[in-house]
Each structure stands twice: as structure tokens, then as C-alpha cells.
Amino acid sequence: MRKKIVAGNWKMNKTFSQAEDLLFSIADRLQKDRPEDVTVVVFPPALYLELAKDVSTDNDFSFGAQNINEHESGAYTGEISAAMVQSIGAEYVILGHSERRQYFGENDNVIAEKIKLALSHELTPVYCCGEALEERENGHHFSVVESQINDALFGLEEDDFKRIVIAYEPVWAIGTGRTATPEQAQEMHAFIRNCVAAKFGKQAADMVSILYGGSCNAANAAELFANADVDGGLIGGASLKPDDFVAIVNSFPK
Ligand code: PEP
């Protein structure tokens, strides 16, 4: 059985004390109300990873970094390595987020390097892919996502592939309040799973969790998570509100 996952991408938000409040609020709510079979992951800014580790003492949630550098170590001022993230006890890293592609010029070749490095440091990459609005309107969304999957993931070994999480995040839905319909999400998730099956076989495809991201919130999570190929969500804005985030964790069909 593949994992059900709800992950919160905090992006560049929260001061130290606000981060502390948010982590404790999430932990507190999860202790009261949380299905056991859902993995919860928080992605705070890297400065707060150690704080996340301290707050999560009862393993209420896992935590991860929002990015790593593609080099092992060295003279890369301001950057954070996979080894550093691993050494602090994190288990996950977001890679390929559309904001990294758009504002920091990351392409699938760089992202592929980062994915390999993450795996070699026992971090689970959450690989984000998804089309821009114009690409969907032109009917190119399947080919865009297929080539993102191909370029970033298909240089890996089959065994590596079983340790990866994919997040389908249509760019037009991120932070816009415009969510993919449950039908659009299911259609793309099934397509991604078929791409994986064609390359690595049905067993690997059935094992990989595919999360939906893009204006997913407490009001629409249940209808998205009700779909066979939607294994959870990567949540941006709503992950900063503890009640909403934990409501999303509780949105899987019973
Ligand atoms: C994201 O940035 O990964 C995301 C899904 O953001 P939001 O939920 O705010 O659209």
C-alpha cells in the first residue's frame, strides 16, 4: 500500500517565535485528531528544522527542507546541502517546486542532480511537476508533465524510484485560489502513474505516492483526496493555519 501524505510547505514565512507557535499548534491538534495511516510532513524554512525536530518528539509529524544545493559541499555561500539536512534528522526535501524553477532558474537537469543527492543522503524527494496556465489552455499539459517526469526522474534506478514522492502542482493553481477540479487532478495523477508504470513497471507505479498541490484547503481537500490516484496533498497557504492544516490531514475518505 502506498502512503497517504499531507505535507505543508511554509515557503518563506514565519519568524522564529511564530514558527514555534505554529509547530506546537500543529503537534497539539494532531495529538487530538489524526488518522494513524496518514504521514504528516512539515517543510519550514531551513533555519527552523531543528525546532521542528524538537517539537516533533512524539513523532506527530516528520519534517523536511524546502530545497538543497546540487553539490555535495563547498564554496556555495548561502546554500544548504543534503548532508546538512540529513544530519539534522530531516527525512524529506521538496525539489522542483515551480517557484524554484521560476525565480531561481532551476531546470530538470539541476533538479535531477538534486534528486540523486537527496536519495544518496536518505532523504525522500518530493518532486514537484505541473504545467503553466498557457500550457493547459493549449492542450499541452500532459506532454509538459511527461517531459518533467522523464527528465528529472527517469535517469534513476527502479529501486530509487520507490523512495520518491511526486507532487502534481499545476502552476496556475499555486497560491491563486484556483484549484484543479477533482477530475483534472485524478486524470493527471493517473497519467503520471501510467508514465511511471511504463518505465519502471506496475509495482513501482502502485507504490509511489502522488500528491496534489495548488490552492488545496480544508474546504476542497476531501473531494480531491477521494480520487483513486490522489494520495494526499502538498499544501502551501493553508499549512500556515493549524486548524486548516489538521482538517486537511483528516480529509481522507474513512
Ligand atoms: C505550494 O506552493 O506548494 C502550494 C501548493 O501552494 P498553495 O497551497 O498556497 O497553492
Image (cartoon, rainbow, N blue to C red):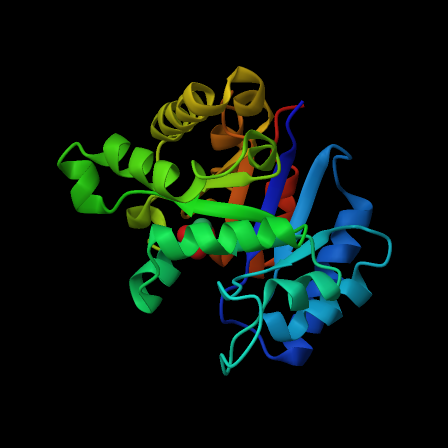
Does any portion of residue 244 appear in the rendered image?
A: no
Tell me the quarter of the image containing the N terminus.
top right
Position above or below: 234 against 104: above
Image point (74%, 51%), residue name: 61
Relative to 73, 187 lies left or right: left
Residue 75, image x and y in percent? Answer: 51, 81
Question: In which quarter of the view is residue 20 placed?
Answer: bottom right
Tell me the quarter of the image containing the C terminus.
top right
The residue sitting at the top extreme is 202
Image point (68%, 50%), residue name: 122
Residue 213, image x and y in percent? Answer: 45, 44
Relative to 51, 105 lies left or right: left
Judge by depth and name the residue closer to the eye, 104 or 151.
151
The residue sitting at the left extreme is 138
Residue 224, image x and y in percent? Answer: 47, 31
Question: In which quarter of the view is residue 56 placed?
Answer: bottom right
Relative to 62, 106 lies left or right: left
Report the number of discs.
0
Residue 63, image x and y in percent? Answer: 68, 56
Judge by depth and name the residue closer to the eye, 68 or 121.
121
Does any portion of residue 32 appear in the rendered image?
A: yes
Judge by depth and name the residue closer to the eye, 99 or 119.
119
Position above or below: 173 against 201: below
Image point (19%, 41%), residue name: 135
Relative to 40, 200 lies left or right: left
